[in-house]
Amino acid sequence: MEFIISDDLLGTFVPIFVYWLYSGIYVLLGFFDNYRLHSKTEEDEKNLVSKSTVVRGVLFQQFVQAIVAIILFKVTGNEDGSSAVPKSWPMVALQFVTAMFVLDTWQYFAHRYMHHNKFLYRHIHSHHHRLVVPYAFGALYNHPVEGLLLDMVGGVLSFLASGMTPRVSIFFFSFATIKTVDDHCGLWLPGNLFHLLFRNNTAYHDLHHQLYGNKVNYSQPFFVTWDRILGTYMPYSLEKRAGGGFEARPKIE
């Protein structure tokens, strides 16, 4: 009897698997001190939450994420349970670009509002900023309410607005997951394509996690478009750190 895993299940669980696989690679690479944006000492001393708490928080968010994805695919799926095949590669490319724009737009405005609303920041978004020194598997460490409103609602909107199929969503949300993990990895590795292709990258987001960057660089996870349009863009310069590695510093243009 042939065993077939549906696109719905793959779209639900592959991004979760990719999250831990990709962040695990960065955990191993974290021992290369010459490429770190913060020292291990800073990571241990500045962060306000233990790594075990971070792991539990991420796993809980991914549990809720899986439930939301299953419901979404069930509600939007075909009656016979089959998954539509994308008509053409140009259509897939258009769906990717549309989903990226929708996700960026939702996350920018929701993220910015959580910083400007004192109640939401103190009780919800500040959980994520307990990681003053970001690291890869802490990318999705959020208060559960933030995980639902920022990440999951944004994901649902990008899925619906783009018209992508569950099969396409496997690749889109895996890509978005990899990008989010990379932005929090805390490493500036040579040849990293995300650093070459995206201005919104590890160093750019690192500024936002510092106290002086709390009101800038809200854009995530792909472009810096909304930051530039609305005056919250803070560029960075990379400087060699005395103890080894790099430091992202605000750059005055």
Image (cartoon, helix red, strand yellow):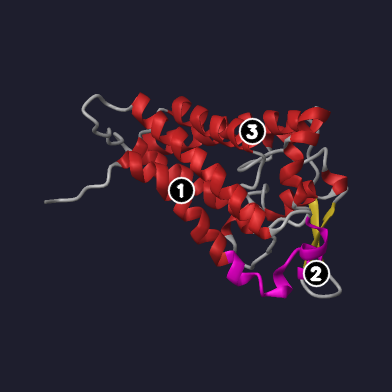
Span highlighted in magenta in the image: 26-47
Tell me whether circle 3 and circle 1 mark residues in contact (CB < 8 Å). no
- Work out whether 54 lies above or below 28: above
Amino acid beneath label 1: Pro
Mark 1: secondary structure: helix
Instruction: Write down the quadrant of residue 229 in the picture.
Output: top right
Q: Helix, strand, or loop for circle 3?
A: helix
Q: Amino acid at mark 3?
A: Val
Q: Residues within 10 Å of mark 3 (few under 14, many from 20)?
A: some
Three-letter residue code for mark 2: Thr
Observer-nearest residue: 61 or 90?
61
Residue 59, position as x, y percentages in the image:
54, 49
Instruction: Give me the disc on residue 15.
Output: 1
* Residue 127 percent coordinates (x, y): 73, 43
Q: Judging from the image, what secondary structure is the residue with disc 2 in? A: helix
Which residue was labeled with disc 3? 145
